Amino acid sequence: MGFNVAVDGPAGAGKSTVAKAAAKAAELVYVDTGAMYRAIGLYLLEKGADIRDEEAVKKLLPEISVSIVYEEGVQKVLLNGNDVSGRIRTQEVGEAASVTSAYGAVREKLLHLQRELAASSDVIMDGRDIGTNILPDADLKVYLTAAVSVRAKRRYTELVEKGEEADLSEIEKEIEERDERDMHREIAPLKKAPEAVLLDTSDMNIDQAVKALLVLIFERRIKRLACEQ
Ligand code: DC
């Protein structure tokens, strides 16, 4: 089995930024599992499906194929063979992913792809249930989080810097709703695995969070190498 790092945590905690940078420094493949759920969400929205109707969503799943390719080390998500990596990054698609990822059939569809990627490479995989469900034997599990107010402020700054309109209290409300859904669904809810290391980045900048994650990764790598000798 590859060397596996599981990074779970709520929306907007900076998982992907931190995990991506740490993956580069530690020469691991970065796998963004949220992008896979988003690809399914995008398909359903474009199809005009009622995403709140679990049975209707289930019926459409055979039409959907999600795969991952790497171009110059960057993950691209393919939806039925087309690169949708850019189009999945909207608030609307994120919401659709959050709603439909609660359905067992949707999770089942992506489980094998995620486990296969982890079996074939040394990975940092980020998501919601990686440490608790997808990779229970991961070498390192990290629960990366930040206070809701901090996550909302970061998102607000990101939008303003892009020249988009943003309302801080509206963003905070959306984050709270997303947390509520992701943490309280029946199947594979977001929660910290008991053995996961808690990394609260509320008072950290990106550099500090990346360094903290890298220290943990190198520690575990050495431990694993020592066990293999
Ligand atoms: O990380 P993200 O915002 O791109 O994820 C979008 C949604 O997908 C998230 O709100 C819940 C779902 N998701 C999940 O259920 N399990 C994962 N491993 C990753 C994401």
Image (spheres, grey):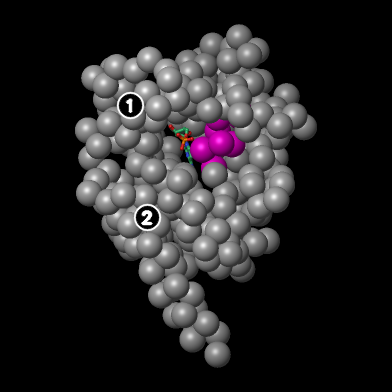
Judge whether residue 36 is colored magenta.
yes
- Residue 160 visible, this orientation: yes
Give the dominant element type of the magenta stretch: helix, strand or loop.
helix
Amino acid type of the residue tagged 1 in the rendering: Tyr
Q: Name the residue rendered at 38%, 62% in the picture.
A: 211
Image quarter in which the C terminus is found? bottom right
Q: Name the residue rendered at 52%, 82% in the picture.
A: 225
- Residue 71, image x and y in percent? 71, 47
Q: Which mark is residue 207?
A: 2
Image quarter in which the N terminus is found? bottom right
The answer to whether residue 145 is left or right of residue 116 is left
| Bounds of the magenta segment | 33-40
- Residue 228, image x and y in percent? 55, 85
Residue 84: name its quadrant: top right
- Residue 173 visible, this orientation: no
The residue beneath circle 1 is 156
Residue with the most extreme right position: 81
